[in-house]
Image (cartoon, rainbow, N blue to C red):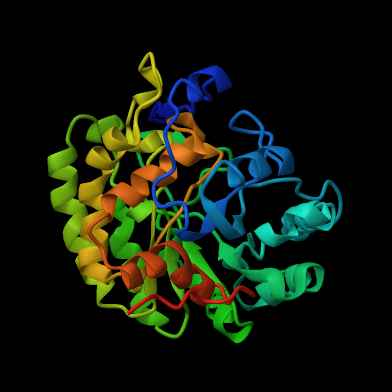
Amino acid sequence: MPAKDLLTITHVSPSQEWLESRNEPIIEPDQSIIDPHHHFSEHWGGYFLKELVRDLKSGHKLCGTVYVQCGLAYRESGPDYLKPVGETEAVMSIVESIPAEYQELNIAAGIIGHADLSMGESVDEILEAHIRVAGDRFKGIRDSGAWNSDFRHGVLPRPQRGLFLDRQFQLGFSRLHKQGLSFESWVYHHQLDELLALARAFPETPIMINHIGAPLGVGPYKDKRAEVMEQWKPMMKALSACHNVYVKLGGLGTAVFGYHFNELPVAPSSEVLAEAWGPYFNTCIDLFGADRCMFESNFPVDRSISSYHVLWNAFKRVVSSASSSEKDALFHNNAARFYKLPVPLIKSAV
């Protein structure tokens, strides 16, 4: 039987002119923020130190960032299993080049890399190589399990089906806690049961759900948001009972979510984004609590639908009625604690 033709979900990078077609005053400019999820990459229109600094300085009060793997600058020689260490080397090279006037931004104060956890216990060699390169900045591993039978998406190779349930993968996963590392989970909503099994099997390992667990809006899920919500929410509720699991609120500019804001003649306002995404974010906060959720930019991927300052305005609109302590947790303190970043916690006013 011939292989099934897969739909390819592609990312669209808008022009800077389109992004700048929407300009807004900064909401709550004194709110301290740690951005716990961004990339450097040639993909998605290109995004490196110059572009990141421009965004971090666009009006919100950024106090630190966490870099998350995306396949940047893997080594071109040596054993294949060690090639992902090149990404950590590249990020450290960028960090070491940051001018003194931008040091207060604490760029890549935490670094998430990649290792093939399917190597089982021998993955220690890779984990230790990352740690040698980045020291205390190295915080964890992302090993994507995002798989769907109907489409392919992303700049990295398509993972095997059911990766998180694989015995060898779980043996490799067991090494994370022993190395003091966390795990970043990127799976689609119909795979959250696989993540749940992993979280229950390894309750001592901190797990971060990337991009709210990806309730899909493409392929067979196109125009079925209510139906997808009914599938996604119970799984997130089950995951919320695992106290080692946290959630990143963001990433909905990723193409698999199926939003088409980039097709508008003018970039969407923060009100429009908050209205579309608020039900998902508020569901996560209701289930996990304000102490296990954190907002993320996912830039430059989410630059497909918004400029940096409008995106963070949208997040602030979603939780406009939250208390000061809840906002400090969602925007700053939770990221600082989860990733053990060298930044002071915000002491909220009583």
Q: Is residue 242 above or below residue 326?
A: below
Q: Nearer the viewer, residue 300 or 258?
A: 300
- Quarter of the rendering containing residue 306: top left
Q: Nearer the viewer, residue 9 or 244?
A: 244
Q: Nearer the viewer, residue 236 or 6?
A: 236
Q: How many marks?
A: 0
Residue at the (49%, 19%) spot, across then down: 18
Residue 280 appears in the rendering: yes
Q: Nearer the viewer, residue 45 or 6?
A: 45
Q: Position of residue 114 (x, y in %)?
A: 63, 59
Taking the image as shown, residue 312 lies to the left or right of residue 274, namely right
Q: Is residue 339 above or below residue 233?
A: below
Q: Position of residue 231 (x, y in %)?
A: 17, 52
Taking the image as shown, residue 60 lies to the left or right of residue 258, namely right
Q: Is residue 237 above or below residue 6?
A: below
Residue at the (49%, 68%) spot, across then down: 335
Residue at the (60%, 73%) spot, across then down: 120
Q: Position of residue 100 (x, y in %)?
A: 82, 56
| Quadrant in which the N terminus is drawn | top left
Residue 154 appears in the rendering: no
Taking the image as shown, residue 227 lies to the left or right of residue 87, namely left
- Quarter of the rendering containing residue 311: top left
| Quadrant in which the C terminus is drawn | bottom left
Q: Position of residue 277 (x, y in %)?
A: 27, 43
Q: Is residue 60 above or below residue 283?
A: above
**Residue found at the very far top of the displayed protein:** 265
Residue at the (44%, 71%) spot, across then down: 334
